[in-house]
Image (cartoon, rainbow, N blue to C red):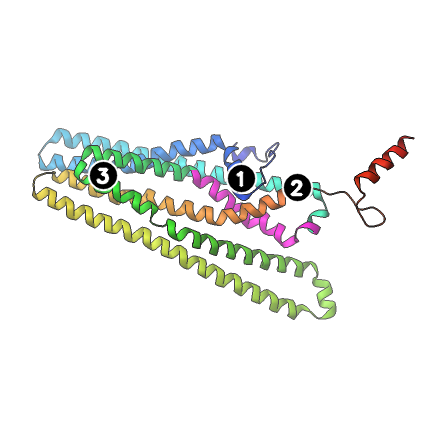
Amino acid sequence: MQIQDLPYPDPGVPDARSGPRFLWWLGRNQLGGQLRALAWGLLHFASVSALPFCVGLAVQAVVDRSGTRLALAGGLLVLACIGNALGDTFLHRAAVTNWITAAARVQQLLARKAAQLGSALTRRVAAGEVVAVSTGDVEKIGWFVEAMSRFTAAAATIVLVCVALLVYQPALGVVVAVGLPALALSVLPLLPRATRRADVQREKAGRATELASDTVAGLRVLRGIGGEELFLDRYRRASQEVRHAAVRSARMWSLISAIQVLLPGLLLIAVVWYGVHLARAGRITVGELVTVYSSVMVLTYPLRHFEEIAMAYSFSRPSAKRAAGVLSLERTAEPTAAGRTPEPAEEQAAGSAAAR
């Protein structure tokens, strides 16, 4: 599915049993786009990761005064740059396509559900909640769906580079192979708290949107009874609560970002210190030290996608839960004239009487 093919002829039947199941259903229905993004992502990250090997080969060629190897390093560097440019361009194109098509699918599902329920929708779910789900929540859901392929490509590239470093220079490769997984997993203890704060922010934002929607809907009545200031004060308080919740959530994510900057820096220092020690002992060459150092420095780029996927899931999970809640609604039987829903026995008796 491409953007020009939207809207979907049929958005499908969603798995609305829970938020994670709904996200998984969306990902499965975009398998072709996910695979394209994964392929271009692998090309992009692999090309970026190949740059240090080309630079290390060039440095060692200069040290050894080998023009042939220097020309070979230059050719490999050109190929890596071309692969980087192509992969980055088409990865961005595929990722944006996945984001927009996922968001469009969710919007179509919500619109279809609204048409099915009709006026019963606003009696089951607040109008502000419906607005929040169909606007901000749709974007967050699309963000997580498209980020999955980029995260998978980044994770696969990190594994491949660690294996390549172990083969290329085992002494330093062991340090990198042990340090990088520790960096990737270092933020896991902070994720539950960050997720809870994101949930609180989303809940308060939904309440503020609901209050604003209800106020606008009843604005004529409010003006008639002079209640504008009362509801304005309520919205001010709700808006401030959203701001405080957003600040608390941002503080947690800033701490996670700081850890993602600090720990790779410590790993770089360890690699340089140990690498210089090995170079002085004659166990590695200057080119190998430059290659390993550059590889660790370049790998901080795909490592950022671990933080991004954690952030995307933290924000999309409550959004998907709310969207699934709306999509799981079903129209109930209309009440009878006496104001109650007829029992099954009464419906059967009425059907028998009609048959007679």
- Residue at the spot of label 1: 21
Quarter of the image where one finds residue 41: top left
Crowd rating for badge 2 (residues with CA inside 10 Å; few <14, some 14–19, many 20+): some
- CA–CA distance in space, label 1 to label 2: 18 Å
How many neighbours does mark 3 have within 10 angstroms: few (below 14), some (14-19), or many (20 or more)? many
Say if 215 sits above or below 68 in the image: below
Q: Which residue is mark 3?
A: 52
**Magenta-colored stretch includes residue 136:** yes
Report the residue at 53% width, 64% height from top: 241
Q: Position of residue 59 (x, y in %)?
A: 15, 38
Q: Nearer the viewer, mark 3 or mark 2?
A: 2
Q: Which residue is rendered at x = 24% and y = 42% of the image?
A: 176
Q: Marks 1 and 3, Cα distance to the nearest angstrom?
A: 40 Å
In the displayed orientation, state which residue is furthest to the right: 356
Instruction: Look at the magenta stretch and give its main secondary structure.
Output: helix
Q: If you read the primary sequence from the N terminus, does the residue marked by circle 3 or circle 2 appear first?
A: 3
| Lower position in the chain sequence, tag 1 or tag 3 | 1
Indicate left or right for 224 with 76 as reference. Answer: right
Q: Circle 2 is placed at which residue position? A: 113
Check disc 2 and report its element: helix, strand or loop. Answer: helix
- The magenta segment is 123-148
